[in-house]
Every structure is written in structure tokens, then in C-alpha cells.
Image (spheres, rainbow, N blue to C red):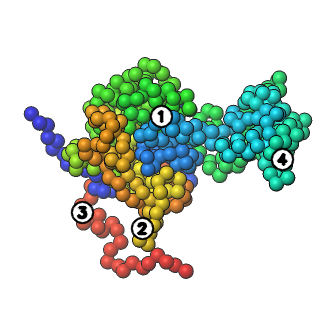
């Protein structure tokens, strides 16, 4: 017989936080937003932790390499969309991993017999203006010199002139030896007022480059999320069809974390995908799964090996799964149940598996509600689609600027791999997402910093200095429809926000 839940399925809009005592040492500048991204055992640290509890959705109109770079520099992670050929997704991952690092492996190299024409062609292809010159033109060859844009003038130098004639030779370079620390390398950059420090081994062969710009940018982005090689952390979406080909390519490109992209994750297809990845690559492959909305779905994916589990079906602003198929659950109710199941699993096994709230975020304060209800971090699509760094077009609509935004379940996305029992090739029989617009919001960092300040301020009002403490001590109350109206501006005539 059909099981009918007696409790009402509720959304974030139906809850408010009740303030706790705010102590004098509970201030926004002392609030920590770090949170685990992947499973870990009791008494150990997770292999990857987020510096802020936000990740971007696995969507064509949201998560590409430019958004991934911007978000990782602010402390979060993007999951580059999987509804594209493997090689193009891999290229995006590589762009993120090569964007900055402490010790960079050079990918733009020349030999002494190359010409200025080769230099210009390589610069156009890679965008790099600093090029090591090695004896054989390889990234690990014997270092002969370096070329920067200061070494030539296109208006005066012949395109046929050899690199050896205008490069800065090694005897005029400041170089570091393999084994020095990044701090020492940065000190050399500052002491000698140079922009690039080549690192060589005992035989004079190039091993790495260290750039001054990376040091400067790190100071501007103190929360940036880096791997053990000081590269930006990046995620990637995968599906349950071509994972045997896609996963090894993504791992080779440097993807730190993957996630199976599906509107309904409680399936044998996801179980098989997880078990294959874990049996083949072990801990070298970190992969999340979902989406689910209850205890049973969570435990099913956790036992299959998921490193985190996404929670939420049909709550996204662009998603119409509920009205098309009649499946889903109110996001607040789903998070509360799955969080309880996660904590029980942790008590029983000593293994903590983070949960990600995916969908249902309308206002900034909904992110704090999700965390208070038990989510470890939040995945958002509409929020990040609004920014300059997202891949969608900015257009003028009437008097306002907007950005295009479409769901992965829409025909525009042509993302059939997302549906395990769907047909491959051709249009979907019906859509589970729509195609629309979101208001343009400028640079990611500017708006995200305001959202994070709201999160910190609210946490302080709840007497919490960390997300873990918020989950333990937060108090929530249900609200009526009239109290929601009461909570906004009312009974006044608002002024236009145009101040001189």
C-alpha cells in the first residue's frame, strides 16, 4: 500500500531563525565558514575542505572555467558542466589548474632555434608572454634563457630572427634551485624586483616557474581554495553513461572532485557508477552523488561510496521536475531528514559524509537556514549565473541587463546523459527545466562578499562562530503567511534608490 507521509513537506520560506545569545567574542571577523567537502573518518581531517560553504551547479549556463577560477579564488568550488564532449570539459579543467600555482610546470616553451614568428604564434595560442627557452624546447630541458614581451619589438625586429639572438640568457637571470620553499622563492622575486623565477635542478634543467603575480593575487584573495601544489581546486560533473572514459580524462587533467549529475540519484545506475569509480581509482577519485530527498536515498549512495550527497529534487528556480513528474520534496524537509540520517550514520560507523543542499534558495538568508538545518554546503545555479564570469550571454531586456539562464533538463541543454533511462540522441520526450533570464549582477566577488557578510552576521546573531556550531545550536521556528508579510517592508512608501 502507498505510504503517505503525515508531516507537511516544507520550504525555506516557512522558517526563521530564533536568535541565541551573542557573546562579545562572537563577531563576524572571528566567524569561520570552512566546511568539509568530502567524507572522512572520526578523528581525521577531510581530504578537501571548502573555505566558504558555496559551490556552483553543474550547468552549461553557470559553471565553466572562468566561473570556476573566480569562485575558487573566493574559497568555493565550481563543478564544470558535463553536458559537453569529454575533451572540451577536460580543457576547462586544465585551464583552472594552470591559472595559478606556487611552482608552475611550464607549458609554453621554446628552443634557441625558434624564431620571433614562433614566439608570437605561441603567445596567441596560449596567452602566455613569459616563455622559457630550453636546449630541446621541452619543459624539463636545460635552461638557456627566458623570453618576455620586453625582449622584442614587433615593429623593429624581423620575424625570422632566432630566439637565441634576443632572449635574456641564463647568465643574466636570477634563478632558484629545486627544493627551495615557496616563501624563499617569493622573497627572491621581491628582492630582485622580477616577475618570474625559473627553478632548475642540479644539472641546470628547468623544473618549474614561480610568478610574482600569483603571490600578489593570493594576498588579494586570502580565502582562495588551493590544492597541495598551490593550484586552484576545481570540480567536474560526470554522468552514468560515459564515466569509464570521462573519469580518467578528468583525473589526468587534475580535477579534484567530481559529482554525478542527475535530477534523481536514488538509482542503480548511480550505484554502479560509484562502485566502478571507487574500485578502479580508490581514494584518488573523489566523487559526490545525488540528488536524493530522504534517508533511504542518502544511505543507498553512501554505502555505494559517495564522498558527499546532494539533496533536493525540483526546488531549483529553473527546474520543473515537480510539475512535470510530480516527484520531489520541500527542500527544508528534505535537508532536515537527510541531515539526521547523516548524523546517525556518523554515530554508527565513525564516517562523516557531507550533504549538499541543492535548490530552493530564493533569498540570501535561505543559505543560512540550509546550514542551520544541517547542510554542510550549498550548490547554487541561479545565484552564480548572474555574474560576469558565467558563460551565458549578457543582454539588454527593456531597461535592464540580464543574463540567459537555462536548466540542464531543458531541450536547449540537450543533456540526455543526465537521465539514466532516457534515450540518447534526439530531443527529450519532455523537459524538466526551462529557458529564461536572471538579473545581471556584475562581478562575482563583489556580490558574493556581501552574501558572506550576511551569513556571518546571522551566525553571530545565533551565537555561532562556525558552521558546525550553528548546526548544533541553531533554533528554528515555523512562520505563518502573515508573519512573512510582516517581515518585509510594509505600510510605507518606498523611495527610489537613486541617491546623490
Structural distance between the alpha carbons of marks 3 and 4: 75 Å
Q: In the image, is 116 to the left or to the right of 251?
A: right
Residue closest to the far right: 171
Foreground mark, 4 or 2, reads 4
Asked whether residue 177 appears in the rendered view, the answer is no
User: Mark on residue 397?
Assistant: 2
- Res 21 → quadrant: bottom left
User: Are the residues at dot 3 and dot 2 in contact (C-beta closer than 8 Å)?
Assistant: no
Which numbered tag is attached to residue 86?
1
What label sits on residue 241 in the rendered view? none
**Label 1 Cα neighbours within 10 Å, binned few <14 / some 14-19 / many ≥20:** some
Return the mark for residue 481.
3
Mark before the other along the chain sequence, 1 or 4 = 1
Label pair 2/1, CB-CB below 8 angstroms: no
Q: In terms of secondary structure, where does tag 4 sit?
A: loop
Q: Dot 1 lies on which element?
A: helix
Earlier-in-chain disc, 2 versus 1: 1
Q: Earlier in the sequence, mark 4 or mark 2?
A: 4
Residue 294 in picture, x, y percent from top left = 27, 37
- Vertical arrangement, residue 446 with respect to residue 5, above or below: below
Residue 129 quadrant: top right
- Alpha-carbon span between mark 1 and mark 3: 48 Å
| Residue for badge 4 | 158
Q: Residues within 10 Å of mark 3 (few under 14, many from 20)?
A: few
Q: Secondary structure at mark 3?
A: helix
Give the residue at x 33% y 48%. Answer: 410
Amino acid at each position: 500500500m502507498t505510504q503517505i507521509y503525515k508531516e507537511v513537506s516544507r520550504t525555506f520560506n516557512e522558517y526563521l531563525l530564533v536568535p541565541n545569545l551573542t557573546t562579545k567574542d562572537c563577531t563576524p571577523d572571528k566567524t569561520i565558514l570552512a566546511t568539509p567537502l568530502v567524507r572522512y573518518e572520526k578523528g581525521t581531517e577531510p581530504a578537501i575542505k571548502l573555505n566558504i560553504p558555496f559551490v556552483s551547479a553543474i550547468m552549461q549556463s553557470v559553471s565553466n572555467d572562468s566561473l570556476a577560477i573566480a569562485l575558487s579564488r573566493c574559497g568555493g568550488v565550481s563543478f564544470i558542466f558535463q553536458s559537453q564532449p569529454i575533451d572540451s570539459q577536460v580543457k576547462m579543467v586544465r585551464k583552472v589548474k594552470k591559472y595559478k600555482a606556487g611552482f608552475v610546470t611550464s607549458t609554453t616553451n621554446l628552443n634557441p632555434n625558434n624564431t620571433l614568428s614562433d614566439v608570437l604564434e605561441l603567445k596567441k595560442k596560449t596567452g602566455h608572454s613569459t616563455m622559457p627557452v630550453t636546449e630541446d624546447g621541452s619543459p624539463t630541458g636545460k635552461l638557456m634563457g627566458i623570453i618576455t614581451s620586453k625582449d622584442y619589438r614587433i615593429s623593429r625586429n624581423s620575424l625570422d630572427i632566432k630566439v637565441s639572438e634576443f632572449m635574456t640568457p641564463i647568465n643574466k637571470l636570477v634563478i632558484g634551485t629545486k627544493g627551495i620553499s615557496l616563501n624563499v622563492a617569493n622573497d627572491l622575486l621581491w628582492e630582485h624586483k622580477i616577475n618570474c623565477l625559473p627553478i632548475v635542478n642540479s644539472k641546470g634543467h628547468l623544473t618549474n616557474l614561480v610568478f610574482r603575480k600569483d603571490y600578489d593575487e593570493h594576498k588579494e584573495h586570502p580565502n582562495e581554495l588551493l590544492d597541495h601544489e598551490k593550484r586552484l581546486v576545481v570540480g567536474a560533473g560526470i554522468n552514468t553513461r560515459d564515466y569509464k572514459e570521462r573519469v580518467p580524462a578528468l583525473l589526468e587533467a587534475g580535477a579534484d572532485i567530481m559529482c554525478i549529475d542527475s535530477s534523481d540519484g536514488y538509482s542503480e545506475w548511480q550505484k554502479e557508477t560509484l562502485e566502478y569509480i571507487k574500485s578502479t581509482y580508490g581514494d584518488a577519485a573523489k566523487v559526490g552523488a545525488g540528488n536524493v530527498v530522504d534517508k533511504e536515498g542518502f544511505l543507498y549512495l553512501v554505502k555505494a561510496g559517495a564522498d558527499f550527497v546532494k539533496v533536493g529534487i525540483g526546488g531549483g528556480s529553473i527546474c520543473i521536475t515537480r510539475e512535470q513528474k510530480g516527484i520531489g520534496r520541500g527542500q527544508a524537509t528534505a535537508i532536515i531528514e537527510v541531515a539526521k540520517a547523516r548524523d546517525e550514520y556518523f554515530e554508527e560507523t565513525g564516517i562523516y559524509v557531507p550533504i549538499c543542499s541543492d535548490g530552493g534558495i530564493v533569498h540570501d538568508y535561505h543559505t543560512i537556514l540550509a546550514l542551520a538545518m544541517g547542510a554542510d554546503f550549498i550548490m547554487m545555479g541561479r545565484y552564480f549565473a548572474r555574474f560576469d564570469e558565467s558563460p551565458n550571454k549578457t543582454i539588454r531586456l527593456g531597461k535592464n541587463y540580464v543574463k540567459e539562464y537555462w536548466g540542464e533538463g531543458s531541450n536547449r541543454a540537450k543533456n540526455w546523459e543526465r537521465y539514466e533511462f532516457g534515450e540518447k540522441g534526439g530531443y527529450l520526450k519532455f523537459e524538466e527545466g526551462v529557458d529564461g533570464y536572471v538579473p545581471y549582477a556584475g562581478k562575482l566577488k563583489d556580490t558574493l562578499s556581501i552574501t558572506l557578510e550576511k551569513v556571518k552576521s546571522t551566525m553571530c546573531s545565533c551565537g555561532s562562530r562556525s558552521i558546525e556550531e550553528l548546526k548544533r545550536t541553531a533554533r528554528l521556528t515555523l512562520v505563518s503567511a502573515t508573519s512573512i508579510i510582516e517581515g518585509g517592508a510594509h505600510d510605507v512608501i518606498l523611495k527610489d534608490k537613486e541617491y546623490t
